[in-house]
Image: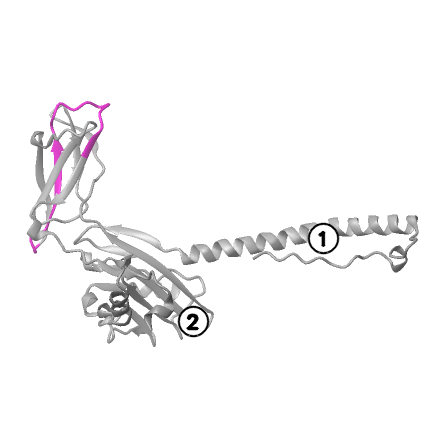
Amino acid sequence: MLVIAVSPSPLPEDCHTANPSKACCSASLASYLADQRNQLPYRMAFFLVWVSLLLLLHGAAAAEEVRAHPFTDVSLDCEFSFIDSTENLEFYWEREDIIEEYDAEDREFYRFFRYYDFFQVFTKVVYQFYDNEEQLEDQNALYEGRVSVDQSEIAEGILTLQLQNVDFSDEALYKCKAVSPNGRGESTVKLIVEDSETPQVKFDKIDDEDVVTCTSKGWYLTPNVTWLDRGERDLSNHSTVEILEEQMNGLYRVYSVLKYPVKLNEKYVCHITEMNENNRPIRSIRRYPKKRFNENNYY
């Protein structure tokens, strides 16, 4: 809300009489206008400060979005300039589920979900630090042995959370909150776990033949690589797939080469998914009925 204050007229009292002196009023008006011009830079600076503050607050409220593939590791950034020591510092990471709402006609159905939240049985705590060391007693069991914060960077205000072996159950909002003698702060990161990927393709030469290659970032138990051209024709039969890396748990990263008569001015798309549906991670979607009725109708 913008409030504009209007100051009383600065003209002398004799200029407000029924027959004011013309010379007096002219001189006073000129003095008033000159004074307003002198104050203009200060008012403009004040206005710009408020605009900057509003933009800063808007940026702080907006959540950074990070995308990851299943079974990979991801970093959730968090940094505060007011932290210069671990003395009397407390910070923690918490998760909040990403909620989707849908319309519900039944008042009793909405009321039931409003008061009985079955999804909040487990603690929200992902990571905690206080008394100069990490405190994991209240940590959600889903994150046991999978999260860490670089202890050497905490005193510099870098509280980045490292999350290993990402799964669809990790898709959520992650809030980083810190309190120290010098101040307090909060930031939010939204983690999206993608169920497939379209890696960047590269033109290359193998045995003097033009080819197109792509490499998966994610890990798959049974990877399926599909090649398409600009017209979305399936060229997969003209490609080969090789194992680039293999983990002990049987997950793979793959490298694929398209040997179809490649044209350097053509567009090629490489798409990688999990072929066996039984091996695909399950995404848990938390959906709630949207409130559509007057609040008084629920009592």
Residue 39: which disc? Answer: 1
Give whichever of 112, 288 is nearer the camera. Answer: 112
Q: Residue at x 20, y 50 (%)?
A: 69
Query: Identity of the amino acid at label 2?
Result: Ser
**Residues at marks 2 and 1, CA–CA distance in whole angstroms:** 39 Å
Image quarter of residue 288:
bottom left
**Magenta highlight range:** 248-269
Query: Identity of the amino acid at label 1?
Result: Gln
Residue 213, image x, y percentages: 16, 34
Along the polypeptide, which appears first: circle 2 or circle 1? 1
Looking at the image, do the residues carrying marks 2 and 1 touch, with CB atoms under 8 Å apart? no
Q: In the rendered image of this protein, does residue 63 appear above or below residue 298? A: above
Residue 75 visible at all: yes
Q: Residue at x 19, y 34 (%)?
A: 269
Q: Quadrant of the N terminus?
A: bottom right
Q: Secondary structure at mark 1?
A: helix
Q: In the rendered image of this protein, does residue 226 appear above or below residue 75? A: above
Relative horizontal placement of residue 238, taking residue 216 as reference (left or right)? left
Q: Residue at x 17, y 43 (%)?
A: 216
Decide whether residue 265 is among the magenta residues.
Answer: yes
Residue 229, image x, y percentages: 18, 28
Q: Secondary structure at mark 2?
A: strand
Disc 2: CA contacts within 10 A as few (<14), some (14-19) or many (>=20): some
Residue 78, image x, y percentages: 36, 60
Image quarter of residue 296:
bottom left
Residue 297, image x, y percentages: 34, 68
Q: In the rendered image of this protein, does residue 39 appear above or below residue 132? A: above
Residue 78 visible at all: no
